Image: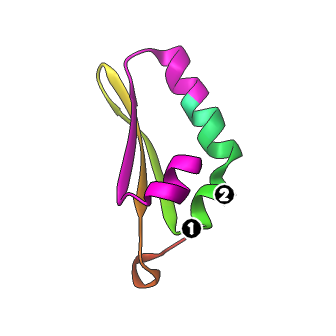
């Protein structure tokens, strides 16, 4: 979260070829979903593109925000 708060990137992507690591990413991102959404990010994924699993944090404006 510190990276997002200090750098404020438009997109952050987590990619893993290893299913165990993808599960760790998913657990972490779900656990901190509220903190991720606070500064205006939306969690997308997991998206599976063999052999990878991808999670994306995308910065959105209020007009783009849809639950």
Say above or below: 40 vs 16.
below
Residue 23, percent from left and from top:
57, 25
Question: Dot 2, crowdedness within 10 Å: few (<14), some or many (≥20)?
Answer: few
Q: Give the side of residue 17 with respect to residue 26, left or right.
A: left
Residue at horizontal 29%, vertical 22%?
50
Q: Residue furthest front?
A: 6
User: In percent of the image, x 40 and y 77: which residue is there?
Assistant: 64
Specify the segment rendered in magenta.
1-24
The residue indicated by pointer 1 is 39
Q: At which x and y percent is residue 45?
A: 45, 44
Q: Does residue 10 belong to the magenta stretch? A: yes
Nearer to the camera, 32 or 64: 32
Q: Quadrant of residue 59?
A: bottom left
Q: Is residue 37 magenta?
A: no
Q: Are marks 1 and 2 in contact (CB under 8 Å)?
A: no
Choose top left, top right, bottom left or bottom right for residue 11.
bottom left
Which numbered circle lies on residue 6? none
> Considering the numbered disc 1 on the image, is that residue within a helix, a strand or a loop?
loop
Q: For this view, does 24 lie left or right of residue 22?
A: right
Q: Does 20 appear above or below 32?
A: above
> Mark 1 Cα within 10 Å, few/some/many (few <14, many 20+)?
few
Q: Which of the two residues, 15 or 1, is positioned nearer the viewer here?
A: 1
* Residue underneath mark 2: 35
Across and down, in percent, residue 37 comes to: 59, 63
């Amino acid at each position: 979260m510190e990276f997002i708060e200090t750098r404020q990137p438009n997109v952050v992507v987590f990619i893993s070829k290893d299913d165990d690591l993808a599960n760790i990413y998913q657990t972490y991102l779900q656990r901190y979903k509220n903190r991720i959404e606070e500064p205006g990010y939306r969690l997308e994924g997991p998206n599976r593109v063999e052999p990878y699993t991808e999670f994306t944090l995308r910065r959105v404006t209020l007009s783009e925000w849809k639950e």
